[in-house]
Image: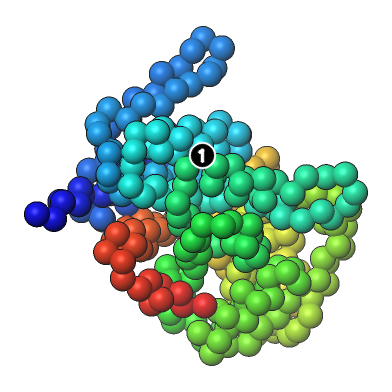
Amino acid sequence: MAATVPQPKIFACQKSKVLAESIAKAFGQPLGNVITSTYSDGEFQPSFEESVRGSRVFIIGSTMPNSDNLMEMLLMLDAAKRASARHITAVIPYFGWARQDRKDKPRVPIAAKLKASLLETAGATRIITMDLHADQIQGFFEKPVDHLFASTIFLPYLQDLGLDNLTIASPDMGGSKRAYAYSKAMESDVVICYKQRAKANVISHMELIGNVEGQHVVLVDDMVDTAGTLTKAADLMMEKGALSVRAICTHAILSGNAYEKLENSQLKELIVTDSIPKEHKSDKVKVLSCAPLFADVMHRVNSNTSIASKFVM
């Protein structure tokens, strides 16, 4: 008699529990029971309070700083591995530390590669993530990586806006490929901002390549941190004659005085996903949930069916 394959089980890291609950609801089953014990010095220990032996396990958690979020993911992966889970998928909506994907000066780490090695060593047999800061980070893994594009979430929203004279913009040269993909889907023009940084999060100079006069502009980026680039680009485009400027950013880090910059800028709207748990402090921020996308892909992974239709770009 053939052995019965257990149902998949879904677990959440603490800081991503709200998103994980939405994903589990869209998937069609409740979250598994995890209890986290914390010592007085801050050390913590997650514990699965149900059997995962022989199961396909999905562990959901964005790994934004501080490092506790990454450490919790690693501990949960290790616990699942030692509890004899059959497959262990790390579902990481926001893959933190990805900006350190290369040596951009001497004597610095490549944190994204180190993180990939840690996840695999901890027990991940598959990674599901969304809009990596650099596509080539997929190559840091020896295990399968499903790199999803938030364009499947954002494009329907853009189309529903019904904007005439639409132009897609990239806030920097590195995002030009992403902007071109959106422009192709929306059948619109593309412009690019050229910026120079004095240091991390500080822009010393910005210029616009292309014409935005009389256009409704949508800036497209993978993340927004201090919002310095986006707000400076929005103000520059309005000076150049744009009718309006919106921004689409998958991961809303919004650190420091980002909300103040948003409020004081000419940016009409910032459209983000809920990949990073955050209470937003600005009416300009519009949040679209990525839960249905992840739930659908998890179903397809579990049933060993293609996820090609989820790759719009």
Residue 210: quadrant of the picture: bottom right
Residue under label 1: 122
Is 277 on the left-hand or right-hand side of 179?
left
At horizontal 55% and vertical 62% (from top left) the residue drawn is 131
Label 1 crowd (10 A; few <14 / some 14-19 / many >=20): some
**Where residue 31 sits: x, y (%)?**
27, 41
Camera-side residue: 242 or 198? 198
Residue 205: quadrant of the picture: bottom right
Task: Give the residue furthest to the top.
Answer: 40
Task: Give the residue furthest to the left.
Answer: 1
Camera-side residue: 49 or 267? 49
Residue 88 visible in the snapshot: yes
Residue 69 visible in the snapshot: no
At horizontal 71% and vertical 55% (from top left) the residue drawn is 101
**Where residue 167 sits: x, y (%)?**
61, 82
**Where residue 311 sits: x, y (%)?**
46, 74
Is 133 on the left-hand or right-hand side of 275?
right
Task: Give the residue furthest to the front.
Answer: 1
Q: Is residue 125 above or below residue 230?
A: above
> Amino acid type of disc 1?
Ala
**Where residue 98 sits: x, y (%)?**
65, 52
Camera-side residue: 96 or 227? 96
> Which part of the image, by quadrant, shows the N terminus?
bottom left
Is 20 on the left-hand or right-hand side of 133?
left
- In this rendering, the count of numbered labels is 1
At horizontal 51% and vertical 39% (from top left) the residue drawn is 122
Snapshot colouring: rainbow
Q: Is residue 178 above or below residue 215?
A: above
At horizontal 66% and vertical 83% (from top left) the residue drawn is 190
In the structure shown, which secondary structural element does the residue marked by tag 1 occupy? helix
